Amino acid sequence: MNTINIEHLCYYYDKVQALDDVSLSVIEGEIHGLIGPDSAGKTTLMRILCGLMPTQEGKVSVLSLDSDDFMQIRSLIGYMPQRFSLYQDLSVAENLKFFARLFNVPAGERDKRMQDLYAFSHLEEFSGRRAGALSGGMKQKLALSCALIHRPRLLILDEPTYGVDPVSRQEFWQMLKQIQGDGTTILVSTPYMDEAELCDRVSLINGGKILESDTLTNIRSKWNRKVFSFSAPNLKQLFGVLEPLAESCQLFGNEIHIVIPNASAAQSLDIIKSRVEGIKYRYEEIESSMEDIFLSYMNPGVWRVS
Amino acid sequence: MSIRVLFSFVKKEIKQIFRTKEMLILMFGAPLLQLLVLGFTVTNEVKHIKLFIEDRDNTELSRAMCEGFKHTDRFDLVQQQRGESSTIMIQNWEAQLVVIVPQGFGRELRQNRKPDVQFITDGLDGNSAAVSLGYAQGIVARFIQSMLQESRQKYPFTALSSMPSQVIVSQRMWYNEDLNSAQYMVPGIIVILITIISMMMSAMSLVKEKEIGTLEQLMVTPASKIELLLGKLIPYWVIAMFEISAVTFAAHFIFRIHFTGSVAEMALAAGLYLMTTLGIGIFISTITDTQQQAMFFSWFMMIFMILLSGLFVPVQNMPYLIKKLTLLNPMSFMLAITREVIIKGTPLRYMFREVAALTLYGFVTFFLGVTRFHKTTK
């Protein structure tokens, strides 16, 4: 049973189309990553799932409920918006209690859950501190705790690690894995390609369209391309040679990554070798990263993998 | 609607109010300051007019008349500097009113020849000039009157006693015998204060939720919008009601303005009026995105409401069209009720028109505010 089913969803802000025929499913129990750059339509999609915006075209069902039943959906899901949006002038404990009450968590149950959440977020020693005085990473943990206070079956997180330091990011992902272990399905959006590796399945989204939606392994094999990393003292000259031959050619630090279809890889490499004679260079085949894949999807003319 | 959810909204709101220093100052410090400053300064009374009397007659009668100017706090007698004429005194701001009693005043009066007395006043401040002239004329008239009575008894057959009796206007200022402006202003200040608290504060606190993103967080909870709105508004309603009582008490001790009407009826009127202002507050919050905008907007509304309320300029004195415009202003009705109830103790049943208007505005505005809030948030 899929936790989320979206079929042919479109959304327009006046004349601007934010979502274009989006079809997507999130399988129960998985961490599903929604990967895409800013303004790809991630937030719009998530807000529709929470019932914060109407379904204009298409069909959305969350936990087998139609999107029109958003009041019922809301009591079963936890949503953490991109911006920290808890009460800065209330303390950690007060924020938790307030949201517990809004989600109708019984009073006896509440204290136990707060203890569980403290154990997992390590926020107990800050329980009396005002939320506004917390560090960025702790704010994220508190927001996550508030979204979890009613034990939701589905957690929707909008760029939860945006602007958080790498250590806190790692910690945050460990917490997500733990939540998943308790049987909660998680839909998380992120602009960071490396976080895609931490998801069970990902959907690549750009310009309101879902480009691909699968496990990372499947996306890689479907992608059917090889990535080579070139390095040379004179990168600029090398770049000029490589660019017209490769499907995608990107500068990564002092390396150039090129993408070549599997089928023509050997042939292309021969051509490259013949063209760059006289220039000192090294190259090696590397494993394709999410970033390589995403960038090549963004490249017009390579929309679909043959 | 769940009472527990509503209660937790109220609790949260009150905590937030009492933790925000600016809110506290605005809600509890500002009203007292306003009461004191406006109560003492906004006044139409004219007192301590600098008066110079040039008695060229200097007889028993003229001196007796001038005596009347000395026993009132309306006038402060000033002395003439050597060699200075009375016109110079007015020019130099040493006198605001000059009374010139001509030579032969006493004699002419005795012979019933209607002597002239000259008043010269500084007309720059027209209001003060007119009022002080009125006082001065009153004093002279009273002197003549008392003198007539006296001489009729003493010398029944003299020319003076044969002067025809005049109509005597006897003035009584009911409800405010001393024409004390604080009596008139303070009820108005009470109305302004509760308007600020309810309209501006509620708009700002609602917009704040929007501004910092908590509104969106609340929207994804199963709590309903009506619980959210009521939970936010009830604290301001209660605080405004408290503030009315506090300011009324303060007015009692500071300005000796005694609450003569029914407290329950005042509370009823205030409760209805607050529905209007809270409704406007919700409305403002739906058309603004930041607290700053909400504050500007509220002030904009406030200025129109105050000017069209009859606080400074009585509604009867306004031009026809403007007078009609005040009918759209709930504050003008509330002001009328507050003045009547506090000062005159008028029962509400004699102000059916005002109460009906407040009820209508209260329910319509609140309904429109809530509806618009529903539409603009999902």
Image: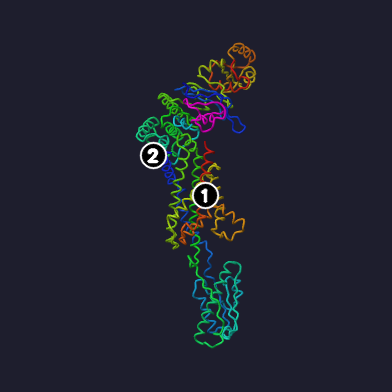
- Disc 1 residue type? Leu
Tell me the kind of residue under disc 2. Gly
Instruction: Name the mark nearer the viewer: 2 or 1.
Output: 1
Residue B284 picture location, percent across and down: 54, 45
Residue picked out by circle 1: B360
Please report, as a chain letter, where disc 1 is located.
Answer: B
Which is nearer the eye, A23 or A65? A65
In front here: B247 or A86? B247
Rendered position, B28 above or below A281: below
Spot occupied by residue A104 in the image (x, y as percentages of width and height): 40, 35
The quadrant the C terminus of chain A occupies is top right
Find residue B181 and report its horizontal and vertical position in percent.
Answer: 50, 63
Question: Label 2, on which residue?
Answer: A128
Q: Nearer the viewer, residue A18 or B30?
A: A18
Does the segment drawn in magenta span residue A50?
yes
User: Residue B162: which numbered mark, if any?
Assistant: none
